[in-house]
Image (cartoon, rainbow, N blue to C red):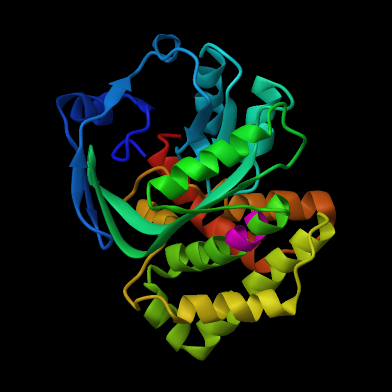
Amino acid sequence: MALSGNDVVFLARGKTLEALRAGPLRVDSIEGDFTVSVRATNEPAEIGPVDAVLVAVKTWQVPEAAAAIKKMEGDSMVVPLQNGMEAPEQLASVLGPGRVAGGLCRIVAHAVGPGHIDHFWAEPSVAIGELEPLRNRTRLEELCAAFAAANVRCDISADMAKAMWEKFLFITPWGSLGAVTRMPVGPLLAEAGRRDRLTKALQEVVALARARGSVLGPEHVEKTLAILDGLPPETTSSMQRDIMAGRPSELEGQTGAVVRLGRGAGVATPVHEGIYAELLPLERVALGK
C-alpha cells in the first residue's frame, strides 16, 4: 500500500523499527520483488489521525497492540489480520464498540530478517467485513479500494465470521499437527494415520464453528484437505516454524483457542487437547516461563 502511494505509517519496535528507519523495506515476491522507503515510529501518539489501523502482529501480541492503538489520536477503524478468532473481541474490549472490523489475509510468506519479507507462494488476498455495526462503514469500502489499487485482491465479506472460521479451519489443525510432528505438509498428509488424525482435527473445528453459530459442514473438511493437498509439499505453517525454532508462537491463539472455546461451547476436542498438552511445555520455555 505504501508502494502504491498511500500515506502509511508503520508502528514497530526493536530491530524491525531500526531496519524500517534505515530503509528501505525489502519484499521478495512471486508477484515481483520491490523495495520501498516507509515511515516508521515506536510512538503511537506521534502518528496522528488515521483512517484505518491494520493489526499485523502475532496473536499473543494483540493485547499489547490494543494498548498502543488506544494511545493514537482519532477514531480509526481497526482491522485485525491474525489467524485466530479472538483478536476482534480482544481489541474491542480495549477500544470500545463500533471501531473493530473482522479481517483475514491469505498469503504464504515469512520474515527473512528485520525489514525483509519473502512472499513465496499464493496470490495475496485480504477479506474484511463487519462483525458488529461499525461507526463508519464507508471506511471498509475505502480500505478495500486501497488494497485493490495496490494489486492486493480484497473482498468485503457478507459473513465475516464464517470467513474467519474457514481460515481458522485451514490454518489451525494443519499448524497444530505440523508443529507436533515437525513435518511439512506433503509428508504430513502422505501417511494414512496422520491424514486421519488431521481429518479428525478438522472435524473438531467444524463442530466448534457450528456450536458458535457459523454454518460449516463436512464439505468444508474436504475442501480444506484439497487446499492442503495443493500446497507445495515442503510448506510449513507460521506457528509450526516458530515452535520448531524455539520462538514464542500462536499456540494459545490457535490450538489453545480450540481447546478453550470447545470447553466453553461443550464441544469435545480430543485431538487438539492432546497436541496442546504436548506443545505447551515448549511454549512456556519459549516465553521464559
Residue 205 in the image: state x and y as whole percent.
69, 64
Badge count:
0
In magenta segment, residue 165: yes
Determine which quarter of the picture holds residue 195.
Answer: bottom right
Residue, x 62% and y 64% (percent of image)? 169
Q: Is residue 234 left or right of residue 216?
A: left
Magenta stretch secondary structure, dominant: helix
Residue, x 65% and y 21% (percent of image)? 95
Residue 124 in the image: state x and y as whole percent.
41, 57
Residue 74 seen in render: yes
Residue 261 in the image: state x and y as whole percent.
73, 50
Question: Looking at this rendering, what residue extends furthest in the bottom direction?
Answer: 192
Q: Nearer the viewer, residue 36 or 102?
A: 36
Residue 50 in the image: state x and y as whole percent.
49, 21
| Magenta-tinted stretch | 164-168
Residue 11 seen in render: no
Determine which quarter of the picture holds residue 20.
Answer: top left
Residue, x 43% and y 78% (percent of image)? 188
Quadrant placement of the N terminus: top left
Q: Is residue 97 left or right of residue 28?
A: right
Q: Nearer the viewer, residue 5 or 264?
A: 5
Determine which quarter of the picture holds residue 262.
Answer: bottom right
Q: Nearer the viewer, residue 108 or 27?
A: 27
Q: Is residue 91 left or right of residue 13?
A: right
In magenta segment, residue 80: no
Q: Nearer the viewer, residue 131 or 167?
A: 131
Residue, x 39% and y 80% (percent of image)? 186
Reply above or below: 282 against 43.
below
Reply above or below: 92 against 240.
above
